[in-house]
Amino acid sequence: MTEFRIETDSLGAVRVPADRLWGAQTQRALDHFRIGDGRMPREMITAYAVLKQAAAVVNHRHGLLTDQQKDLIVRAAEELLAGRHHDHFPLRVWMSGSGTQFNMNVNEAIANRCCQLAGTPLGSKAPVHPNDHVNRSQSTNDSFPSAMCIAVAQGVTLRLLPAVRQLRDALATKAQAWHALVKIGRTHLQDATPLTLGQEFSGYAAMLDDNLVRLEQSLGGVFRLALGGTAVGTGINAPPGFDREVAAEIAHLTGQPFVTAPNKFAVQGAHDALVWVSGTLKTLAGSLLKIADDLRLLSSGPRCGLGELRLPANEPGSSIMPGKVNPTQCEALAMVAMQVMANDVAVALGGAGGHLEMNAYKPLMIANLMQSLHLLHDACRSFRVHLVEGLEPDHRQLAAVVQRSLMLVTALTPALGYDKAAEVAHYALDHDTTLKEAALALGYVTADDYDRLVDPATMTGAV
């Protein structure tokens, strides 16, 4: 049977499992918010660990913590950063919209770990108290949005940006390798003038280049921290200069350019910077969906579709049709993109839902943001490794389609005029002939003139 200890908060005594580091307020939240299965993102644990460590250092500098209290809090926070004790953070996303319970989960877990390190009983709040020491000079209203910003900034810079760059590089490698491989273009899913497969793939790589710029630009607001604003942005109960010093300490610990927000009322009453990041994730998702859908179309077949690309055969595609291979990586990336777009709706609604001096949708926003970051990172890696790097063109199909395309007639327009060129195209379609045969049958050009005017490679502008 589970053994319990008694912890207390301002409302009284609460039974807590004896071997858990959390305290009374965390236990109350566990009892009162049994909603769904999703826990708070793990990145919020480590983001808060950085924040609490930085706050302890600055509070000690101002004489608000003893040497022992500061050292214990820093040690406990470093253990959290190392991935220890994460099973002591059981709270689900769907709790108080301010995130107070999660902040107290961090405060209680660190304080109780300090008790263990100091050899005092769990729940004794000595030598470190969760509110008086771990939460010193802070409120959930400024610490939770700051932790959100730390988690998102780290997620974008350390995980997502590298994954997108690697996918961009893989696409650019294909673009270079296929720079002279002529294929037919398509607009409205109908035949269009030629281009090279390399040109087509250069467009995909350039789309991701643009997304990388957008992501980096969107982080500007995320690097401005609310910490130091305390309850409503005025900085009550924080020493003068705490906001600047703690932001500098967080910047030192993370290697990221965090600064204090110039106006705490703005960043505590609203979380527009995070909404902007979510919007850039949605834009990236849209680009990835376009790329996935294009490659799915280009690889359709292999004999009864476009069939211009050959996807890696990663797994059997059907339980009933032998030999079938499906574009599963394209489908997975497409589903991820759609989920990220849906997550952005939740983030945008949460960001717009603040009232007066605080936004009460913080857990909703960070849960969706971190899921989007995770999904995009994993999907970009999977798509690159299991599809793009093994992608191959079907040279025979590419050449055959180019020769059959009616839109090569565009090269005849300067010589014949639009109307006669259109007549050649319609004649070829109606009589199931090549363009050359149609042009010769109509008597508009000689064979030599046709061969001189209609050169698919020249039409691409790549030669």
Image: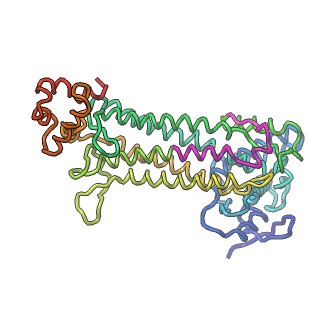
**Which residue: 41% across, 46% down?**
383
Kindly identify the residue that appears in the image at 75 percent across and 71 percent down: 4
Please name the predominant secondary structure of the magenta segment in the image. Answer: helix
**In which quadrant will I find the N terminus?**
bottom right
Q: Nearer the viewer, residue 207 or 387?
A: 207
Q: Is residue 286 left or right of residue 142?
A: left
Q: Position of residue 306 (x, y in %)?
A: 26, 47
Q: Is residue 138 visible?
A: yes
Say which quadrant the C terminus sits in: top left
> In this rendering, would 199 be left or right of 16?
left
The percent position of residue 42, horizontal first and vertical second, equals 62, 53
- Residue at 72% x, 71% y: name it: 31
Image quarter for residue 2? bottom right
Q: How many marks?
A: 0
Q: Nearer the viewer, residue 310 or 203?
A: 203
Is residue 111 inside the magenta stretch? no
- On the question of residue 116 being in view, the answer is no
Q: Residue furthest front?
A: 419
Q: Which residues are magenta?
A: 257-283
Instruction: Reply above or below: 384 against 178.
Output: below
